[in-house]
Image (cartoon, rainbow, N blue to C red):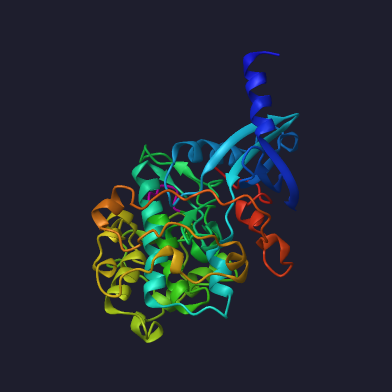
Amino acid sequence: MDAVERANVERQKRWVKDQKVGEGTYAVVYRGREASTGRKVAIKKIKVGQFKDGLDMSAVREVKYLRELKHQNVIELLDVFSSKTNLNLVLEFLDSDLEMIIKDRSLVFLPADIKSWMAMTFRGLEFCHRNFVLHRDLKPNNLLIASDGQLKIADFGLARDFADPGYKMTCQVITRWYRPPELLFGCRYYGTAVDIWSVGCIFAELMLRTPYLAGESDMDQLKTIFRALGTPTEQDWPGHTKLPDYITVGQFPKTPLRDLFTAASPDALNLLSKCLIYEPRRRISAKDALHHQYFFAQPHPSYPSKLPKCATQLATAQPLEEVDANVDMESTVAGGKGGPIKARPKRKLNSPYDDSKSRSIARRLDFTQPIPGS
């Protein structure tokens, strides 16, 4: 056994798989723990043998980008090891996700709560974009929530770098309800603006407590967007009629956001409108969003530990050092502040996997779908 094999065996011994919590065509996800400390983890076992050319590209991407991205608002990849013909990704265990919280009608959201979730989302996304990584699948169930309330961007299976602005990319990315119109029209050259549109849809969903732009097909998605925001003109979006898959889908008037988001503040509506601009180059960046007046106006963002939690989170919550979500935005852009998340005490806890009515957190790791393009 050479040194590499010995190191792999040592890493494998460090982690214990306790319970299978989900299985798809391409991977199995286990709830596990660190053998020495009992710390809970999620272990994602990729079935390497399922792929003609060896490894699934989504697994390669997830490992590549999570090894590079270390931030309190990005899920942490703790370890990687192989066993037989399988690749195992060890990820930090998270109790819930934003979709579960949005759908829990027993929870009441305050404007300060929405502001906190948005600040953490933009903080994590700004870090990704600053490091030239597009996520390309932002949606509420890929925004995981730790027991201390910290939001973390997860599932980098569709992520890719964008250092070369002239490189052609697939438009078959981002879940339809959160996909920007330029991708629906077949755009193959794009940048960070595609993620910003997704965040705008999430922002709207937090305020409405239901998906904002929920189309049933790609064509219906475009109609849904245009009904909500008006059919774009050449003045609104120069050149969009020249995109590869452009098609006319009807003329719809622009409806003021205030008509639907009746309780939103002027600052919230202004930020939302800047995320949902048709012209990608005019959309606000994650960095500029963090400096938007919305985050400085009253009410200040809720402390993450005070944010609404699902019943499953309340069962697992432990006393943690308070982290102030009302951070100075200069330090937010530099990576945020607040102490590291502390390891939970060693004891058996309830989890979302014990609730048959809850969607398994394992599904947030997107282990059932192949990569639809590069």
Residue 203 counted in the magenta span: no
Say if 156 sits above or below 313 in the image: above
User: Which secondary structure type mostly characterizes the magenta part of the structure?
Assistant: loop
Q: Nearer the viewer, residue 145 or 161?
A: 145
> What quarter of the picture does the C terminus occupy?
top right
As drawn, is 124 to the left or to the right of 312? left
State the residue in front, 82 or 146: 146
Q: Name the residue at 30% across, 59% down.
A: 327
Image x and y of residue 283, in percent: 31, 60
- The residue lying furthest to the top in this view is 2
User: Can residue 54 be seen by looking at this rendering?
Assistant: no
Q: Judge left or right: residue 126 versus residue 201.
A: left
What residue is shown at x 31% (from left), y 63% (from top)?
A: 326
Q: Nearer the viewer, residue 340 or 201?
A: 340
- Which residue corresponds to the image point at 38% horizontal and 41% vertical from the top-left? 132
Q: Which residues are magenta?
A: 187-192
Q: Position of residue 109 (x, y in %)?
A: 46, 77
Q: Is residue 248 visible?
A: yes
